[in-house]
Amino acid sequence: MFESPAVMGMASALARNAGARLGAIAENVANADTPGYRAKDGKPFSEVYGTDPGLLLRATRPGHLSAAGGESFTAISDRPGGHMSPNGNNVSLEGEMVAAADVRRDHDLALTIYKTSLGILRASLGRR
Amino acid sequence: MGPFENSLAVSASGMEAQALRLRYISENLANADTPGYRRKTAPFEAELDGGQATGRVELGRVELDRSDLTRVFDPGSPLADPNGYYDGSNVDMVIEIADAREAQRSYEANLKLFDQARQMSQSLLELLRR
C-alpha cells in the first residue's frame, strides 16, 4: 500500500496486523478439536505500534538489519491462559469468535482511514 | 493477500475434517444394529509438510472402538449362541448424536471465519475501485 503520509502507514500496519491475527484465529478454530493444540494469537495493534521508530535501526536497503519494520505487526505467538480441556487443547470457540469480531473491526477501521486519506489526497490534487 | 489466502485454506481444511468426521458418525449410526459392528473414530491431527506444521488440520487414520460389543438376547436369530445371545454393535446413539452436534458447531465456526476472511479481502480490493 501507499504509505507516505504517516497516517496511511499506520492504517496499512493495522490492516496487516488484522490480517495476521485472522490467520492465527482461523488456525485455532480449524484445530478446535485437535488434541494437544495450543491456541495462538498476534498481539493487539496498540501493543505493537507503541515502539518508538526513532530508536530503531534504520534499514534503507533490503540487506540491512531491521529491528522492527513490518514484521513485528504480524508476529504470532502462543496465547497464554485459556481453559485447558482434558485432551490438552485450550481453544474456546466463543473466545475465537470475539477475537474474530475484534479483528474485523480493526480491519474495517484501517481501510476506512486509508480510503478517507486517499480521498483527501485526491481532493488536494483537484480531483474528485 | 498472503494471510487471507492462508486463512481461507486453513478454514477450508477445518470444514473438510469436520465433514469427514460427520460421515463417520453417520456410518456408525447407520450400523447401530449391525451385528459385530465396531464404531469408527478418527483423531484430528495437525497437517505436516516436510515435518513443518502448516496450520491446516486433517483427520488421521480411522480406528475402531475396542470397547465390548453389546450382547443381544434373541434366541430366534441365526447368529445366536446356545444361550440365545449374539454380539450386537458397540455404537452408543447418545455419544454419536453429541459428537455430531460438536462437529456441526465446529463446522459452522470454520465457515464463519472463512466468510470473514473472504469479506475482509474483498473490502481490501474495494480500495482499487473508482
Image: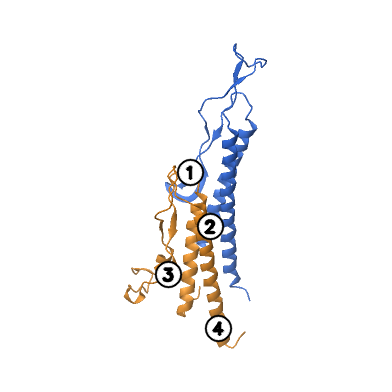
Chain colours: A orange, B blue
Q: As displayed, is residue B25 above or below residue A94?
A: above
Q: Amino acid at mark 4?
A: Ile
Is the Cβ of the residue at disc 1 closer than 8 Å to that at disc 2? no
Q: What amino acid type is highlighted by mark number 3?
A: Ser
Q: Position of residue A22 (x, y in %)?
A: 50, 60
Q: Nearer the viewer, residue B130 or B74?
A: B74
Chain to which the residue tagged by mark 3 belongs: A
Q: Say which residue label 1 marks.
A: B45
Of badges 4 and 3, nearer the viewer stands 3
Q: Position of residue B130 (x, y in %)?
A: 63, 76
Say whether disc 2 or disc 3 marks the residue closer to the N-terminus.
Answer: 3
Of mark 4 and mark 2, the one earlier in the sequence is 2
Check disc 3 and report the residue beneath it: A46
Pointer 4: what residue?
A: A120
Name the disc covering residue A97, or none.
2
**How far apart in space, not on screen, are marks 2 and 3 (Cα)?**
20 Å
Amino acid on which the number 1 mark rests in the picture:
Glu
SS under mark 3: helix
Callout 4: SS = helix
The CA distance from mark 4 to mark 3 is: 25 Å
Name the quadrant containing residue B102: top right
To the question of a shared chain for discs 4 and 3, the answer is: yes
Residue B24 visible in the current orientation: no
Q: Nearer the viewer, mark 4 or mark 2?
A: 2
